[in-house]
Structure formats: C-alpha cells, structure tokens
Amino acid sequence: MNIARVDLNLLVYLDVLLREQNVTRAAEQLGITQPAMSNGLRRLRALFDDPILVRSSSGMKPTERALEVQPKVRQILSETQFLLEPKQDFKPLSSKRVFRIMASDYAEATLFPRLIKHIRSEAPNIILDVLTPSDVSYKDMEQGRVDMAINRFDEIPQSFHQTTVWTDSFSCLMNKENPAAKNFGLKTYLEAQHVWVSKTGMGVGFGVNPEKSGGLGWIDQALSRIGQKRKISVFTRHYQMPGLLVQDNDLIATLPTKVAVMQAERFQLELRDPPYYIPEFELKMAWSPMLHHNLAHQWLRRLIGYTVGKLR
C-alpha cells in the first residue's frame, strides 16, 4: 500500500474510537458530527480490511486486530505530537507547572514526604496535585490529564510507559506490651486480632466482606494458601492509621515493610517478620505515551528516581 494515498487523519479517528468504543462520544471528542465519524469508521474498516469495532451485548467492542494496532497507533500519534511541539527548555527553578499524580495511600505515605522535600529544593514554585485512585481513570491518564500513576498494578494498558519504583516485603507491627510479641509465631499470630489495610487499585472501592478472606488481598491470600485465616477487627483504607491503632491496643497490623518501619520508629512499636510467607510486591510508576517526551515530565521522573535512590 502506498502511504501517500492514505489519509493519516484516520489514525486520529482510530485512536479515539478505540478509546471511547462509541461513535457518538468519539465524534464529540474530535468536535465533528456523528455522520463524519461513522464515515471515518467505514474508511478505517476498508483500510485495515477489518470491522475494527463490533456490536456486543454490552456495546461496541474492538476486534483482535484493532487491539493489536492500538498501542502502535498511540505511539505514532504521541511521537508525531512531540515532533510538532515547539522546543522549549524546562527550568525547574522558575517553573510554576502543576503536576497531577495519582498515588496510592501507601505510595503517598512512603515516597512523597522525601519527594516533596527535593521538589521544594529544586523547583519551589511547582505545585503537586496528589489524587487518589478513585479520582482517576485510565482514560484520564491516557489523554495526559494526569501526569502519572504510582501504585501497585494488577494490569495496565499496553500503550503506557511504566517502571518499577521499588520492591517491598511485609512486616508485622504491634505495641511492645502486646502478648503476641512475647512468643511471636504462627499460633500467636492467628490467636490475635488484626488490622486490615486496603490494597488500593483503580476505581471506587466499596465495603469488604470479612467472610471472603481470599478476596481481602495478598496477606489473606497468603494465609489461605496454608489453610489459615486471621481474625480482623478493624478495616481501614489508610496506611497512616495502623500505627495509631496498634499503639494502645492488642492488635497486629501486617503492612508493607517501608510503612511498618516508619511507624515503628515514630510510635516506638515492635516490628516482626511475618510467621508465614507473603510474596513481595512491586510499586510501579506509569504514564501516558503523550507525556513521555515532555521535558518537564522527564525532569519529574528523574527526580523520583533520585529520591528512590536516596530512600534505599
């Protein structure tokens, strides 16, 4: 096929259609009429010799071929946008840019205090807008409305760039007078009462069911694999809470080690290794290809990397 005969605007149509999976919404995104977008879809089908979008019981769904080309199309458009943008230097010291970062409570508690210290030193006029996972969708990130997400991801769109921030293990936190601390092992762990802290993902979360321990996250899944179940007295969504909760109670909190160490030092608490195997997990940073070449974004990613290096 001669590319000179191809209307490359169709790639823009394809990108929006696959993102919205709806002709009307795609037309609204591009500021064109629905008939014009329908005509664009017809031309895309002819170009790729593929339906691109097909009807299903839950609406329009992309074909296998469409899903295959989607990340490549997104990359092409991102690099084209970078090519056409005027070259501008980024000067951290004078910049007043607002960075919007989606971060889990765990990431915010461990990484951000030190990161903000470095930002205040290098770029005192920059503003951070830290969003929770329930505030943000992958579509917001893909379109560049959110600069990046720092979280533990089960899955993430293939078109996103990502890197591992660090790998963390788990530790048990309790006050020094807790009876379980005197002879700590699996038996005393299971006899004790526990604090559960959420594994935060994208989307709004709702209440938990204590009876379904396998659905309560990695810690309870690890217990389930050895045929055990812990007694949970408190469910919280905030990683700042466990240290306060166990300080004057007979509770045990099993937390990511980086959080547990910080709270043990702050509240003079006992820190122990779990009496069973819990797999480590990765904290990751992900961002849209639309922002990959942005100089300000590159500076922030480098600063996060520098901050992480200092924390290790």
Image (cartoon, grey):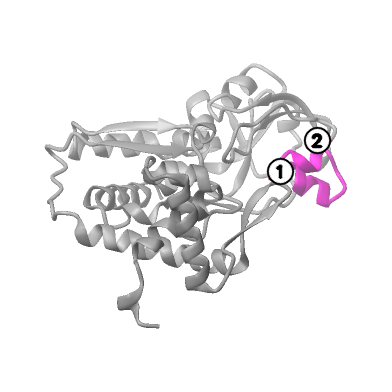
* Residue annotated with mark 1: 219
Q: Nearer the viewer, residue 60 or 238?
A: 60
Q: Nearer the viewer, residue 124 or 242?
A: 124
Rounded to the nearest whole Å, what is the CA distance between mark 1 and mark 2? 10 Å
Q: Residue at x 68, y 18 (%)?
A: 249
In the picture provided, is 305 more to the left or to the right than 53? left
Dot 1 amino acid type:
Ile
Residue 166 in percent (x, y) is at: 47, 53
Q: How many marks?
A: 2
Q: Is residue 185 visible?
A: no
- In the figure, residue 181 lies in which quadrant? top right
Mark number, residue 230: 2
Image quadrant where one finds the N terminus:
bottom left
Q: Which residues are magenta?
A: 212-230
Q: Nearer the viewer, residue 104 or 10?
A: 10
In the picture provided, is 166 more to the left or to the right than 62? left
Q: Give the vertical position of 217 relative to 88 (above or below).
A: above
Discs 1, 2 touching: Cβ within 8 Å: yes
- In the figure, residue 254 lies in which quadrant? top right
Dot 2 amino acid type:
Arg
Of labels 1 and 2, earlier in sequence is: 1
